């Protein structure tokens, strides 16, 4: 078993591969290549990326993109529908207005109202035949930060399997995709962070051919007058979502886990867990605003103490 780390998508990416040394090295290299390739298509920090070109052409013209970019935006819109707009790839202009990590600005109600037309995900136009994406209003933009890492983890894991790895883990920050298992183990043990105790774990779960993703209010936030303002905005109010401290989702695909954790965070504990219980192959751990832990029915027997 080998483990390596590289910087991609603005975070340290860890890839672990199970197999002979030669196979593991080849699989890890294939995984990193795929993550890097997707970053070039999807990162809005890269001016020449496909999504940057889509954003630059907002209000002007449709932009032709690769099948991967089209697929990810199609899936993002499906995730928005599933979470009643809780997950929203068009919310970027509002996130920038709050600027949680830089200016720590609290926008006025009027400012947020003016931004609402730019954050309407239902206006995003996809043409499957022409393979184009069009944002009809100038100032609109797409940011796949809430789903792109899960998608990249899925694709990297596929590349590793093709390279012959018997098992592996792709970890992009809080988005982790596993396949196969460690020798003499049930799967890959992954810890679920405590949202209020730095470095503490709430529980451990063994993942096998599954992905896990966490959305929390503890990574990017500031406090003012005793109120915590964080980066996960409710797209309906364009203010920080108030019902949860963290949401961890386990699913077969990283794309699903990554998109759902944000959407469920916005929906809140009751509606969010009701959605999880309706979905096949999806489980979740929700920590509500009071620190209470709610675990989906299919997960209770699988969690163990750290």
Image (spheres, grey):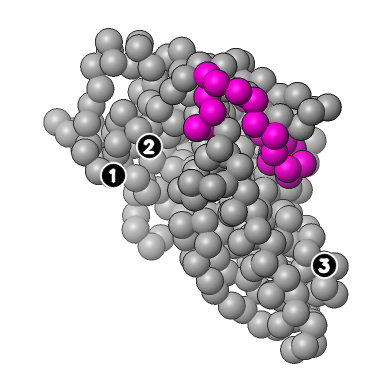
Left or right: 232 with respect to 189?
left
Asked if labels 2 and 3 touch by Cβ distance under 8 angstroms, the answer is: no
Q: Quadrant of residue 187?
A: bottom right
Residue name at image x 67 percent, y 67 percent: 33
Q: How many other residues sit within 10 Å of disc 2, few (<14), some (14-19) or many (≥20)?
A: many
The reply to whether residue 135 is in sight is: yes
Residue name at image x 82 percent, y 73 percent: 163
Residue stretch rendered in magenta on the structure:
55-81
Depth check, front residue: 179 or 203: 179
The reply to whether residue 303 is in sight is: no
Residue name at image x 62 percent, y 48 percent: 41
How far from the left and from the top, in percent, is residue 304?
60, 59
Query: Would you name the residue on which mark 3 appears?
Result: 161
Q: Earlier in the sequence, mark 2 or mark 1?
A: 1
* Residue at the extreme left: 225
Depth check, front residue: 271 or 143: 143
Query: Would you name the residue on which mark 1 appears?
Result: 101
Looking at the rendered structure, the secondary structure element under dot 3 is helix
Check residue 231 in the rendering and tell me which mark sits there, or answer none: 2
* Disc 3/disc 2 C-alpha distance (Å): 35 Å
106 is within the stretch colored magenta = no
In the rendered image, which quarter contains the N terminus? bottom right
């Amino acid at each position: 078993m080998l483990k390596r780390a590289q910087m991609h998508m603005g975070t340290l990416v860890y890839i672990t591969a199970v197999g002979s040394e030669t196979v593991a090295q080849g699989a890890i290299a294939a995984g990193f290549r795929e993550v890097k390739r997707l970053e070039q298509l999807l990162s809005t920090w890269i001016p020449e990326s496909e999504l940057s070109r889509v954003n630059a052409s907002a209000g002007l013209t449709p932009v032709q993109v690769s099948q991967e970019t089209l697929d990810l935006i199609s899936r993002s819109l499906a995730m928005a529908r599933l979470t009643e707009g809780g997950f929203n790839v068009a919310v970027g202009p509002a996130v920038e207005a709050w600027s949680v990590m830089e200016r720590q600005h609290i926008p006025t109600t009027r400012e947020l109202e003016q931004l609402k037309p730019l954050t309407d995900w239902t206006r995003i136009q996809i043409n499957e035949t022409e393979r184009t994406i069009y944002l009809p209003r100038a100032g609109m933009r797409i940011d796949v930060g809430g789903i792109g890492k899960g998608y990249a983890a899925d694709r990297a894991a596929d590349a590793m399997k093709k390279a012959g790895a018997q098992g592996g883990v792709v970890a992009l920050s809080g988005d982790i995709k596993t396949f196969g298992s460690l020798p003499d183990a049930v799967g890959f043990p992954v810890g679920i962070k405590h949202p209020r105790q730095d470095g503490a774990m709430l529980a451990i779960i063994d993942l096998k051919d599954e992905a896990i993703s966490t959305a929390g209010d503890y990574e990017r936030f500031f406090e003012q007058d005793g109120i915590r303002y964080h980066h996960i905005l409710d797209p309906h109010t364009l203010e920080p979502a108030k019902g949860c401290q963290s949401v961890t989702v386990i699913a077969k695909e990283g794309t699903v886990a990554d998109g759902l954790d944000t959407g469920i965070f916005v929906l809140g504990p009751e509606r969010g867990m009701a959605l999880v219980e309706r979905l096949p192959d999806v489980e979740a751990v929700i920590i509500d605003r009071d620190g209470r832990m709610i675990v989906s029915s299919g997960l209770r027997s699988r969690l163990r103490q750290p």
